[in-house]
Amino acid sequence: MLEAFALFLVRTSALVLASPLIGTGTTFSGYKIGLIGVLACLLFSLAGFPVVPTSSVIELGILGLRELLIGLILAFSLHAAVLAVRVAGELIGTEMVFNMASVVDPGSGTSVPIIAHLYELLFFLAFLAVDGHHWVIRALVDSYERAPIARLSLSGALPGVAVEQFSQMFAAGMTLAAPVLILLMMISLVLGLLTRAVPQINVLEFGFSLRISGGLVAMFIFAPMLAPALDRLLQRLMAGLAETLDALVV
């Protein structure tokens, strides 16, 4: 019974610690330990105290590695969505020349561009508003039904599902940046024409001001379009979690 609880603990720990917003951070905080412990105990109780039919330390280690991979695979869907939003924000920040200034993310301790950080905050707020953290817990519970512990088998369809998820998440995330990027590209075209028509203009100084002001105006104008874009991304995230769970079945 102790071996079974350890396997539950490994999969739960992998998902919680690898998930963005929940597991990100520079230290192993106490709330993470409590969350992992509570979830592992509840899921272990719901499973009916399963028994692991093995006495070999090597086989138990392989089973633990399987549980670790399943937890990381579930967390990958969340990271794919966050990465799509981050790429969209960095593309806009690059066109607005805002990436020269960045802020320190308190969660990871790394430097994050301002626009990318703003879009990530909007995504996380939308994620929490639709109870996205409940999706993660439900996915963890369902994973024990689709892929019970103490089995050495693992579906070979998971790599293909991960690649498909990443491409679809990236496409959904690009819709966040598309309207603003199109306007900024038009501004770049106008700057190029002005350079050819009036060579005396200080394009560097004028371009900085025009790009920043144009980007901020575009973000304000196209702000109503963020809601459907985020909704599409969240729907794709939920569908990705369901596809991952289906792929766990051998």
Image (spheres, helix red, strand yellow):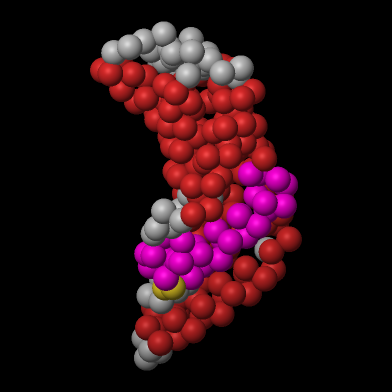
- Front-most of 243 and 150? 150
Q: Residue at x 53, y 25 (%)?
A: 244
In the image, residue 21 above or below residue 206: above
Can residue 10 be seen here? The reply is yes
> Is residue 216 shown above or below 50?
below
Residue lying at 50% horizontally and 49% vertically, measured from the top left: 32
Q: Is residue 61 magenta?
A: no
Verify whether residue 118 appears in magenta. yes
Q: Residue furthest front?
A: 2
Where in the figure is residue 98, as x and y percent of width and height?
45, 74
Question: From which residue to which does the magenta span run?
Answer: 104-133
Determine whether 173 is above or below 207 in the image: above
Relative to 220, residue 171 above or below: above
Q: Quadrant of residue 237?
A: top right
- Please name the residue shown 49% across and 84% down the image: 209
Along the viewing direction, whichever of 24 and 201 lies nearer the viewer: 24
User: Which quadrant would residue 42 be assigned to in this image?
Assistant: top right
The residue nearer to you, when weighing 43 against 212, is 43
In this rendering, does residue 186 appear at all? no
